[in-house]
Amino acid sequence: MQSKSNFKNCLLYVITDEKLGQERSHYEIAKLAIAGGADIIQLRDKSAPGKKMYEDAVKIRKLTGETGTIFIVNDRVDIALASDADGVHVGQNDLPASIIRKLIGDDKILGVSAESVDDAVRAKQDGADYLGVGPVYEARGSKPDTSAPWGLRLLKDVRAAVDLPIVAIGGIKYENAAEVIRAGAHCVSVISAVVSASDIRKATADLRQLIENERSRRDG
Amino acid sequence: MQSKSNFKNCLLYVITDEKLGQERSHYEIAKLAIAGGADIIQLRDKSAPGKKMYEDAVKIRKLTGETGTIFIVNDRVDIALASDADGVHVGQNDLPASIIRKLIGDDKILGVSAESVDDAVRAKQDGADYLGVGPVYEARGSKPDTSAPWGLRLLKDVRAAVDLPIVAIGGIKYENAAEVIRAGAHCVSVISAVVSASDIRKATADLRQLIENERSRRDG
């Protein structure tokens, strides 16, 4: 199992999605993304029955254990526990972070999505180990027109306010990843930029190289 | 918390459903069903986000704790643990029962839906405390025409093969509950027969009385 201390060095966080994966399974997506250098794999499936998601989690846990990749399960704390994932990621509408911390203990990684500085401050108080900050580029419900500059500003504000690793989320791709790093993100998470690529391995490798270059430039 | 040993004396098991509840919440349904004599309340919500389901579970846990009613959470083992429910109920497409037993420990109640004698035998091996057997009257996917006699036969077969409390599930209502008990069920579970009633308390009380009478007649 990967320790939390590795987290701040992570650059690229790939979230699996079979609907966007062009017939490729969660496992196949994970395997190709890991081959391309993904530091973290998140299994995310909002519609699969528990049995299928558990079976996928067990397979990806085995794979990530072999490669030393951090493995996170989205939302389903029970499946994270059952598969011995490294951690769990939740949004503001999922089980409360403070409750999850009690269920998973101190060793597992807890990630929480934050759409505001207040969300981020509360997530840290509730025991989060990292923040998923955004959506940086995707429309946010009722305010579709404000998302791009709003998202970069949010990254800067959260970075200034909360001392936790920041994973930027929401609509990030090769063309805009550099400015996300410049705005303060430690790590970039993607779904479609990698999962929908015809060559997942190459898309992962190219994006990770860009992030690595940009972080070196920023952090010196 | 209710002990498993109470389970075999239970007669009526009410599953909450806000979609069928005519604007009444899970909590309101539970409260009225308990007032009518429900022995067990199961919170079931396949579409609610985790946060809402957790909040509902906490409220129903408090209520059932006060009334001494058994409280079961459907599918979401994490929410059962987080709300300190008495147990969890899963179907064949949910997390495997053997895995859930490890997550919940020995004290909590584990219920498993069985659609065949094989399912029932395996559920007992995997650590189930009771079986949800059916669907007794509802159509089963590809075989809508065979369900009624098939369901009663299944109850008899499972009763003969497996020594666990049997909760009959699927399309049971006042008019057919007696024959379900005669076929060997210990307990009857309902959704719409109670949840969709204009007077939930009365529908619960009437159905429970009928089951009690029929069990007394059967068991002497």
Image (cartoon, coloured by chain):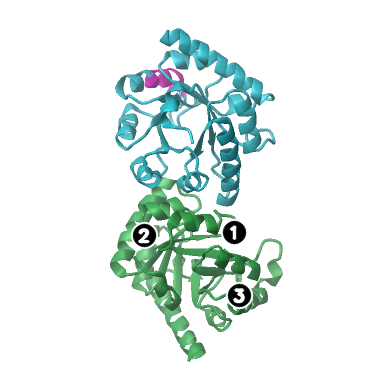
Chain colours: A green, B cyan
Picture layout, residue B94 above or below residue B176: below
Where is mark 1, residue-wise? A92
Residue at screen point 42% across, 52% down: A79
Q: Nearer the viewer, residue A209 or A198?
A: A209
Whether residue B208 appears in this view of the structure is yes
Depth check, mark 2 against mark 3: the one in front is 3
Residue B33 is inside the magenta segment: no
Where is mark 2, residue-wise? A27
Magenta residues (range)? B145-155
Q: Position of residue B150 (x, y in %)?
A: 40, 20
Q: Are marks 2 and 3 on the same chain?
A: yes
* Residue B60, image quadrant: top right
> In the image, B94: left or right of B123?
right
- Mark 3 residue element: helix
- How many neighbours does mark 2 have within 10 angstroms: few (below 14), some (14-19), or many (20 or more)? some
Which of the two labelled residues, at mark 2 and mark 3, occupies the earlier sequence position? 2
Which of the two labelled residues, at mark 2 and mark 1, occupies the earlier sequence position? 2
Which of the two labelled residues, at mark 1 and mark 3, occupies the earlier sequence position? 1
Where is mark 3, residue-wise? A158
- Mark 1 residue element: loop
